[in-house]
Image (tube, helix red, strand yellow):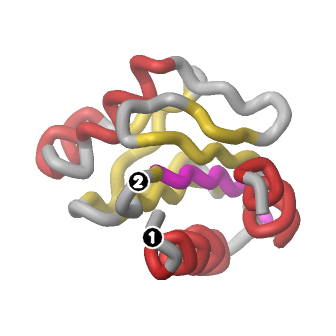
Amino acid sequence: MSWQAYIDSSLVGTGHIKRALICSHDGTPWAYSAGFNPSNAELKALIKGFADNAGIQGSGINLQGTKYMTLRADNRSIYGKKGAGGVVSVKTGQAVIIGIYEEGTQPGQATTVVEKLADYLIENGY
């Protein structure tokens, strides 16, 4: 399956994720949904948060000009919230998966979608 197929079917295709991106650990995008193109600086700051949990807790998560309040940050997962929507980001061995959800989606539904794809990629060496 191509990286774009993961975006289209495994993330956005679930109906729980509105916009998504998969990138390398250096922030280079591998695939993304239409209209979702965070800057390289935003991606690098998010990815740095996996190692600097306290830093991203204090600064929040900025993606495509939207600032999310950090709810959780550890070496695997970073979750953020803004209003009724939010962001779920998970780091695998080689990739970072980012999913944005909006009002109408429960945070737990979005989290499950992104975390399950991350588990699948990890099991398959990514």
Q: Is residue 25 left or right of residue 109?
A: left
Marks 2 and 1 close (CB-CB < 8 Å): yes
Give coordinates of residue 35: x percent, y percent. 80, 29
Q: Earlier in the sequence, mark 2 or mark 1?
A: 2
Q: Is residue 23 above or below residue 95?
A: above
Does 123 appear above or below 105? below
**Amino acid on which the number 2 mark rests in the picture:** Gln
Marking on residue 94: 2
Residue at x 64% of width, y 57% of height: 84
Residue 55 in the image: state x and y as whole percent: 15, 39
**Pointer 1 local density, CA inside 10 Å: few below 14, some 14–19, many at least 20:** few
Q: Which mark is residue 6?
A: none
State the residue at coordinates (22%, 61%). Answer: 75
User: Is there any visible trace of residue 74 in the rendered image?
Assistant: yes
Nearest the eye: 116 or 120 = 120
* Residue range of the region highlighted in magenta in the rendering: 96-104
